[in-house]
C-alpha cells in the first residue's frame, strides 16, 4: 500500500497542523466575514497572516493559522448561529483545482465521493470521513477527533455545508439532504440559517457528525461526466500527492509508516527502509540530515499512539503489547519518561 500525504500529516501527531497549505480557504472565510461586517484585521488577528497574502493564491499558511482565523470568526460572530454552515455553503468543487475537476467529471456522485476519499490530502476539511448506506439513505460521516475543541463545532458545520455544496456541484443538480446530525450542543438563538442552507433542521447532541441523502441520487449520471478528462485529472491529483509527500520529508513518511504498522508488530527499520526503497544506512543518513533518528521517531510515535489508546480506555497491559514492549513495566517506564506521569495517572480508566 502506498503511503499518502494524508497518512503523513494525520499520523505524525501534533506537528501535522504545521504542514504548509494554500490560503484559498482563509481568503474565502475572510471575504465572507467582511460581507457580514467584520474587518480584515479582526479576522486575521494573531494569525500572523498578512492581509496582502489574501490576494496571493500562491501564499502558504499552516492549519494552525487557519484555526486562529476560525477562532476569530467564532468569537466575532458568536451571536450568529450557523456561521460555519453559512461559510461552508460557499465552498465549491472548482476551488479545489485538479481534485475539483476530477469530481466534476466523475460518472456519478458516488464516484465523486470516492475521489475525495482517495485525495483527502487535497481538501481543506482537516477531517477524514466515510460513507455508509442505511436503508434508503447514504450517510456521509465526519471524524473531527483531531480538530481542536474550540474550533470543532465550526469546522463540522462548515464541512457539512461544504460537502453538500460540492456534492451538488459534482452531481450537476441540488442534492437534498434528508438528515443532518451534529455531536455538539444546540446553539442559542435563531436556527433558521441551518434550515435555509441545509434544507433540514439539524439534530444536535447526536452520536455522530453526519449528513444524509437519498441513495438513489448516488448513482445518477453526472451532467459533466467525461471519462477521458476524469482520468487525466486523477493522474494530476496523484502527481500532486507525490510532490506533497516529498515535501513532507523522510521523517514525515517514516512517522506515517510507523503509525500505521507499529500496532501490528511491524515498523522495523528494515521494513520501513524497504518500503521507501532505500537501505537502512541511507535511511539513517537522511533522517540525520533532517535532525532526527529512527529510534527517536519510534519513540515519538509510540508516545502519540499510547496517549490515544489510553485516552480511549485501553488497558495499560494491552497498550504495552500493541506497541511492542516486552512487558508492562518497560512501557510504564517509557511513558513516565515522556510525560512525567504513569499511564494510570494519565488515564485512570486504563489502569
Image: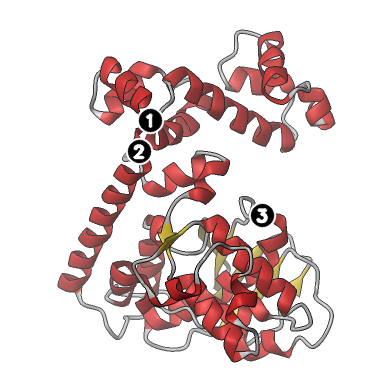
The residue positioned 30% from the left and 86% from the top of the image is: 223
Considering only order in the chain, which callout, 1 or 2, is on the residue closer to the N terminus?
A: 2
Q: Residues within 10 Å of mark 1 (few under 14, many from 20)?
A: few
Marks 2 and 1, Cα distance to the nearest angstrom? 8 Å
Would you say 213 lies left or right of 59 here? right
Q: Nearer the viewer, mark 1 or mark 3?
A: 1
- Which of the labelled discs sits on residue 148, or is there none? 3
* Disc 1 secondary structure class: loop
Quadrant of the drawing holding the N terminus: top left
The residue positioned 29% from the left and 74% from the top of the image is: 101
Can residue 138 be seen from the camera position used here?
yes
Q: Answer above or below: position of 293 versus 173.
A: above
Q: Answer above or below: position of 49 versus 337.
A: below
Q: Residue 89's spot in the image, x, y percent?
A: 54, 82
Would you say 161 lies left or right of 83 here? left
Can residue 89 be seen from the camera position used here?
no
The residue positioned 38% from the left and 18% from the top of the image is: 269
* Pick the front one: 329 or 174: 329
Amino acid at each position: 500500500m502506498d503511503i499518502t500525504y494524508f497518512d503523513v500529516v494525520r499520523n505524525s501527531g501534533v506537528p501535522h497542523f504545521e504542514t504548509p497549505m494554500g490560503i484559498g480557504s482563509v481568503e474565502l472565510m475572510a471575504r465572507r466575514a467582511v460581507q457580514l461586517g467584520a474587518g480584515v484585521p479582526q479576522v486575521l488577528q494573531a494569525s500572523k497572516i498578512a492581509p496582502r497574502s489574501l490576494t496571493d493564491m500562491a501564499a502558504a499558511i499552516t492549519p494552525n493559522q487557519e484555526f486562529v482565523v476560525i477562532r476569530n470568526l467564532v468569537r466575532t460572530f458568536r451571536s450568529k448561529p450557523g456561521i460555519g454552515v453559512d461559510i461552508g455553503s460557499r465552498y465549491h468543487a472548482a476551488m479545489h483545482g485538479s481534485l475539483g475537476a476530477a469530481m466534476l467529471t466523475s460518472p456519478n456522485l458516488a464516484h465523486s465521493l470516492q475521489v475525495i476519499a482517495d485525495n483527502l490530502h487535497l481538501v481543506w476539511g482537516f477531517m477524514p470521513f466515510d460513507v455508509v448506506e442505511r436503508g434508503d439513505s447514504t450517510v456521509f460521516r465526519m471524524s473531527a477527533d483531531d480538530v481542536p475543541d474550540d474550533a470543532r463545532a465550526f469546522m463540522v458545520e462548515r464541512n457539512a455545508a461544504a460537502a453538500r455544496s460540492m456534492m451538488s456541484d459534482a452531481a450537476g443538480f441540488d442534492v437534498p439532504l434528508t438528515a443532518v446530525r451534529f455531536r455538539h450542543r444546540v446553539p442559542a438563538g435563531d436556527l433558521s440559517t441551518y434550515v435555509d442552507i441545509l434544507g433540514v433542521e439539524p439534530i444536535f447532541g447526536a452520536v455522530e457528525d453526519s449528513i444524509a441523502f437519498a441513495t438513489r441520487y448516488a448513482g445518477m449520471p453526472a451532467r459533466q461526466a467525461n471519462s477521458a478528462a476524469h482520468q487525466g485529472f486523477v493522474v494530476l491529483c496523484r502527481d500532486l500527492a507525490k510532490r506533497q509527500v516529498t515535501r513532507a520529508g523522510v521523517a514525515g513518511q517514516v512517522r506515517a509508516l510507523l503509525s500505521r504498522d507499529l500496532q501490528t508488530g511491524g515498523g522495523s527499520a528494515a521494513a520501513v527502509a524497504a518500503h521507501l526503497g532505500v537501505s537502512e544506512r541511507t535511511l539513517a543518513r537522511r533522517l540525520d540530515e533532517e535532525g532526527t533518528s529512527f529510534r527517536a521517531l519510534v519513540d515519538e510515535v509510540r508516545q502519540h499512539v499510547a496517549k490515544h489508546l489510553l485516552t480511549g480506555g485501553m488497558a495499560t497491559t494491552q497498550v504495552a503489547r500493541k506497541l511492542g514492549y516486552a512487558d508492562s513495566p518497560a512501557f510504564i517506564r517509557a511513558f513516565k519518561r515522556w510525560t512525567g506521569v504513569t499511564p494510570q495517572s494519565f488515564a485512570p480508566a486504563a489502569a
